[in-house]
Structures are given as C-alpha cells and as structure tokens.
Amino acid sequence: MLVRAAVVLMTGAAAVLAAIGPGEAAQPRPPVGAVAVIGDFGSEQPAQRAVADLVSRANPVAVVSAGDNVYESDDYDSIVGDYYGRWVDRGLFLPAAGNHDYSEGIESFDAYFDYLGGRRVYSRVVGGIEFFVLDSQAALDSARELRRQYTWLRVNVPRSKARWQVVVLHHPPYSSGEVHGSTPAVQWPFGWWGVDLVVSGHEHHYERLTVRGTTYVVDGAGGKDLYSFGTPLAGSRIRVDDSFGALFLTTGSGRLAGEFWSTDGRLLDRFTVPR
C-alpha cells in the first residue's frame, strides 16, 4: 500500500514509496535532463560507482555536490574526475566544500575546480535554478566568515533573476541523523529571503524535512558508508538510511520538483516545492 510522505515515521527502503501518492506508478528511471545532486561520495567504494552510473544514465544538465568530494586522499582527478569528469570538463560540476575536502587539503579542491577561480562561495544558474553554494566548514571555523556568508546570501538571493533559488552547503541546518545531527549555526531564515530549497550532506543518508514552510533535503548517500537515524525531528517527512542514490531536480510546468532514486532503480521520494 502506498502512503503519503507526511505520515511516514519509518526509515529505510520499507518506507521509500512514501512520497508517491495512491495510484501513482514509479517511473522506470530518473528524469532525463534534470540537475543531479549528490553528496558525501568521494570514497572510491563500489557504491560511488553505482551512484555515478545512475547519474550518467539520467544525463543531467549539471551535477551539484553537497560536499565531501574526497576522503583520505586529495587525488580529485581519480576520485571525482573518473566518475563525473564529463561535467567537470564543462564547468557543470558545482561542488560545495565539505569537512573532508578541508582535511585532505582545500588547496587541492581549488586547483581541481579551477573554473571556480578559487571561490568556494558562489552562485550559478543551471536548469532554471540559481544554486547558491556556501562553504559551511569555513563558516563554522570563523565567526567573521559565518557573518560574511550570511550577509552574502541575504543580499543576493532576493536579487536573483532565476525562477528558483536553491542553497547548497555541506553541514545540514536540520537533520535527524544520529552521527552529526543539526547545525544550529546555519539555521538561517532561508525561506524569508526567498530560498525555495536547502540541500546539504554530511549525514550519510537521505532525509527530507519541512521547517517553518521551507523544504530541506539531506542528501549524503552518494557513495560513502551509510549512517543511521536518531530520533526524528518534528519536520522530518521521509528518511532513507539503507540505500545509496542521487537527487534529481526539474523545473518543468512552472514547478520545482525533486526525485530521489536509489542505485537499484527505485524511486524513493518525490516532492514538489511550493512557490
């Protein structure tokens, strides 16, 4: 039996049909021409290849990363390029910096993604969406940098000419994860500024939440070992902690829609972001 995501209180694949309404049938594959979003993927484990193959089959117009593009090595050419090089080569791989990008040497991040010009806080319009990418590790390490990024986002989101505005950062403002959980320092009034969706990683699983009317997605199931959930937050709508996958965003028919697909071809979540 299919149920709505809003009433799902269980985790894992048993609940994954949650966001599909009664009578709806899952698509056979992810939507072609979407923007793919991955996070916490740079492990060089088999799951990373499975997620990359999933993304490749969908042929997205761009790939956005919620951080931790590498683990235990700064060899971006093999850890990122061998999986997502076709988008990197065209400057259509939009990475956020994660804590592991810093611990492995942030200079290597800057050198590999040279089309960013050394910027780790930036925006780019692709697929009808303006993505505002933050450097949450730097913000957490420095009160001054935290204020700078807060001000940059508050000023620039209302100026956006794109139909949709999505914020990407590594550390989740809200998360039911038991390893890291929420990050109070970046619980900013995103919706008040005009942000439609906030995507993060850091917790290695998938979760969608609604907090004060704003949609938040934690998408850290890109290839590194998965994490379990703790006590669900009040706004948690769906939680998946036993499947690797990727989020696909589309903007057709005047709406921003998201689908999270597992590497074994299951549609685990589908949602539409209200304007």
Image: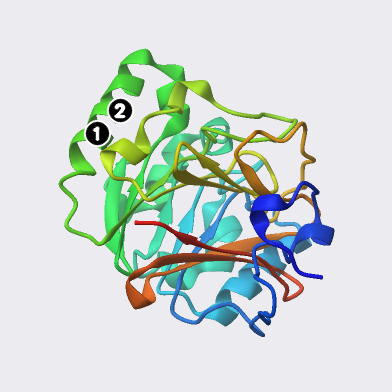
Residue linked to disc 1: 154
Pointer 1 local density, CA inside 10 Å: few below 14, some 14–19, many at least 20: some
| Image: 207 above or below 172 | below
Kind of residue at disc 1: Arg
**How are the colours assigned in the image?**
rainbow
Disc 1 is placed on an element classified as helix
**Whether label 2 touches label 1, CB < 8 Å:** yes
* Count of picture labels: 2
Residue 235 x %, y %: 60, 39
Q: Nearer the viewer, residue 273 or 81?
A: 273
Residue 219 x %, y %: 60, 50
Residue linked to disc 2: 150
Q: Is residue 120 visible?
A: no
Q: Residue at x 55, y 58 (%)?
A: 80
Disc 2 is placed on an element classified as helix
Q: Which residue of the protein is positioned furthest toward the bottom in this rendering? A: 28
Q: Residue at x 36, y 37 (%)?
A: 190
State how far apart marks 2 and 1 are (Cα). 6 Å
| Image: 126 above or below 147 | below
Quarter of the image holding residue 130? bottom left
Pointer 2 local density, CA inside 10 Å: few below 14, some 14–19, many at least 20: some
| Image: 273 above or below 101 | below
Q: Residue at x 64, y 63 (%)?
A: 19
Q: Nearer the viewer, residue 134 or 12?
A: 12
Q: Which residue of the protein is positioned furthest toward the top in this rendering? A: 143
